Amino acid sequence: MPSHMRFDRVALGYAILRGAMLVLFSAFLVVAPERAMAGSSAEPARSLGLIVASRTILLGLVLIALALGRKREGLGWVLLADAALQIFDTGMALATGKGALGILPLALCALDVGAAVLLLRGARGSREMTVQSSSS
């Protein structure tokens, strides 16, 4: 198996794992808010938590669906959007004086960008090969 195919599978696997992680944490926040995050079951935190959880579940399901459908280009762009969200989370951690909380989002951002670059390059390469084979 060529190395670019192996990297492509790793990127797709990462997207499925990332999507599952988002869905599971958010579902946990909806089902057992106090166990997921202390103080999140009282209003208005509960309503805000449900809003955030619904959007996060949607993002996770989109990542999983695109990865399973092998929609590399779309998945790459969604991963870049997730990376932007991780940069925001890191910035919020730093702005509130909780720099240690910014380490995980920063690491996820790096993984998102790396997987997105691999997927977008792979999608572009596949398009170029299709154009070359159809013009021959």
Image (tube, helix red, strand yellow):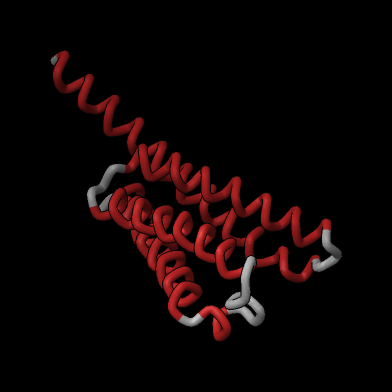
| Residue 5 position within the rendered picture, expressed as x and y whole percent measured from the top left | 30, 50
**Residue occupying image coordinates x 46% and y 77%:** 28
**Residue occupying image coordinates x 35% and y 61%:** 16
Q: Quadrant of the C terminus?
A: top left
| Residue 45 position within the rendered picture, expressed as x and y whole percent measured from the top left | 63, 68
Residue 6 shows up from this direction: no
**Residue nearest the observer in this picture, 124 or 63:** 63
Q: Is residue 135 left or right of residue 41?
A: left
25, above or below 64, in the image: below
45, above or below 117, in the image: below
Name the residue furthest front.
43
Residue 42 shows up from this direction: yes
96, above or below 69, in the image: below
**Residue occupying image coordinates x 62% and y 76%:** 42
86, above or below 98, in the image: above
| Residue 127 position within the rendered picture, expressed as x and y whole percent measured from the top left | 28, 28
Name the residue furthest bottom.
35
**Residue occupying image coordinates x 42% and y 43%:** 76
| Residue 116 position within the rendered picture, expressed as x and y whole percent measured from the top left | 46, 45
Residue 118, picture quadrant? top left
Name the residue furthest right.
97
Residue 123, picture quadrant? top left
Q: Is residue 86 left or right of residue 135?
A: right
